[in-house]
Amino acid sequence: SIIAVIKGDAYGHGITECTRIFLSEGCRAFALASVEEALCVKKVCDELSQQANILILGATELSMIGEVGHHDLIQTIPSFDYAKKLSRAASEAGVCVRAHIKLDTGMNRLGFATFNEEQRAVTTAQIVQISKMPGITIDGIFSHFASADEIDEHAKKRTSLQSIRFFDTLDRVRVAGVDPRVVHLCNSPGAFTRPSKD
């Protein structure tokens, strides 16, 4: 299935209009940069009586965590420290927040480190701890390809390495007893160049 990434006002195309179009085409998952954008998508879904999974890619201000829970939005967790803060904020707001764990497999932005065996072991242990925190339900896990749109051999090797790191970590997490319902890795270029692999 496809997650429509329509952050930044759908890259200038209009978040409301694009949400309506994607819903009409059967899309039932969206990713946004902020809780404000996510609430715009939620409003359109409610107006059209449509259910959709709405993922917030950025770190939501803790004062807004109640809104995330009340509207059944999905919050990205990019670090163990943020998870602890999210758990406290959700508990204080009396909500349980669905969350997707962000792994850093080579984008070098945000996410739990997976670059070597030691990092993957630490990340796995932290994810297990998060799964036991009050106010959080781990609904998914994901990463992002850095250079899947490039065709040189270095870029292809980098993308393959990211995939290896991601699925090795996912396997470890599952063996440890946490089985995320949703797993996503491919961006648009990755979906075209690696459809059978990821």
Image: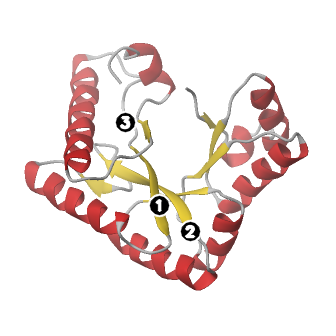
Q: Amino acid at mark 2?
A: Cys
Q: How far, Cα to Cα, is label 3 from label 1?
A: 28 Å
- Counting residues from the start of the chain, the first of labels 2 and 3 encountered is 2
Within the image, what quadrant is residue 127 found in? bottom left
Query: Quadrant of the image for the N terminus?
Result: top right
Report crowding for label 1: few under 14, some 14 to 19, many 20 or more residues within 10 A (C-alpha): some
Disc 2 vs disc 3: which is toward the camera?
Answer: 2
Residue in front for this viewpoint, 88 or 57: 88
Q: Say which of marks 3 and 1 sits in front.
A: 1
Q: Horizontal and vertical percent for residue 96?
A: 56, 68
Q: Secondary structure at mark 2?
A: loop
Dots 3 and 1: beta carbons under 8 Å?
Answer: no
Q: What residue do we see at 37% from left, 34% from top?
A: 145
The disc, 1 or 2, on the residue closer to the chain's N-terminal end is 2
| Amino acid carrying mark 3 in the image | Ala
Q: Which mark is residue 26?
A: none
The tag earlier along the polypeptide, 3 or 1, is 1
Q: Which residue is mark 1?
A: 137
Marks 1/2 in contact by CB < 8 Å: the verdict is yes
Callout 2: few (<14), some (14-19), or many (20+) C-alpha neighbours within 10 Å? many
| Residue identifier under label 2 | 96
Left/right of residue 34 with respect to residue 44 in the rendered view: left
Q: How many neighbours does mark 3 have within 10 angstroms: few (below 14), some (14-19), or many (20 or more)?
A: some
Mark 3, residue position: 146
Taking the spot 36% from the left edge, 24% from the top edge, the residue there is 198
Q: Position of residue 98 (x, y in %)?
A: 53, 58
